Amino acid sequence: MTDALDGHPLLGQVLVRSAGTDAKVALEPCALVRESAGPNSAVPTPPRPLTFRRVDAADLILTAEASQRAAVVRLLPHARTKTFTLVEAARLAQGGIVNGSLDVTDLPSEDRMQAFVSRLNASRGHIRLEATRTQRRFLRSTVAIRPLDITDGHGLSRSAHHLALSKVGESVAELAAVMRATF
């Protein structure tokens, strides 16, 4: 996200931090994450444990999965209005740019992020998002398809890990493009 916002007069100063609901302290980002970041990218920082103080201080919280979004809200219930899955935020932002509800350029620069997040939250329920559905596998079992989640690629095959990183990259690009256009 840092790279996607870099160079914008206001957004280039946004502080992006990583914290996890299940973060292992002092673990460095995996080789695939470092590789996908590229040589001129901001160095991915190791995740830190999610804390009440970090959640309270954040203007916008992006998670990979709805279960992580729920963990944030359990930690601090009023954070619900500023917590989204990355895919959810990107889809809501795309819908908001289409209907014009996210433009914050008329506001003082110090108020824009909070207004953007507030408008993103207000668009929940007004912009159609893909719903979780089930799919039958192996004749008997079913699996939930959660289109707003990005499954953690760690511990999966290399191709599944690449797919997860690709989905992160696409969603970050979509969200950052809207932010750059509306700030």
Image: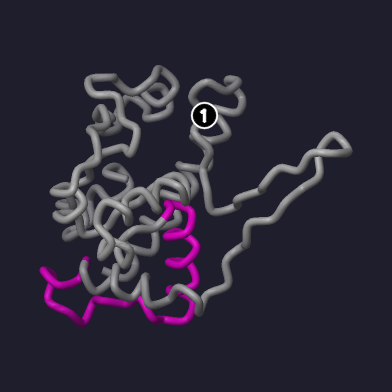
Does 127 sit left or right of 70 as displayed?
right
Quadrant in which the C terminus is drawn: bottom left
| Magenta-drawn stretch, dominant element (helix, strand or loop) | helix
Q: Residue at x 34, y 33 (%)?
A: 22
Is 154 positioned to the left or the right of 143 in the image?
left
Quadrant in which residue 105 is drawn: bottom left
In the rendered view, tell whether residue 27 sits above or below residue 84. above
In terms of image quadrants, where is residue 136? top right
Q: Quadrant of residue 162?
A: top right
Q: Residue at x 61, y 25 (%)?
A: 159
- Which corner quadrant holds the N terminus? top left
Q: Position of residue 52 (x, y in %)?
A: 18, 48
Q: Position of residue 167 (x, y in %)?
A: 52, 42
Tell me which segment is drawn in magenta: 85-113
Residue identifier under label 1:
153
Q: Closest to the observer: 53 or 122?
A: 53
In the depicted view, which residue is nearer to us: 58 or 140?
140
Front-most of 145 and 40?
145
Of 89 and 180, the residue lying toward us: 89
Q: Secondary structure at mark 1?
A: loop
Give how far across and how far down residue 132 sits, in percent.
Answer: 63, 57
Crowd band around label 1 with a 10 angstrom C-alpha radius: few (<14), some (14–19), many (20+):
some
How was the colour assigned to the protein in this rendering?
one colour
Seen at 60% across and 52% down, the residue is 147
Q: How many marks?
A: 1
Magenta stretch encompasses residue 134: no
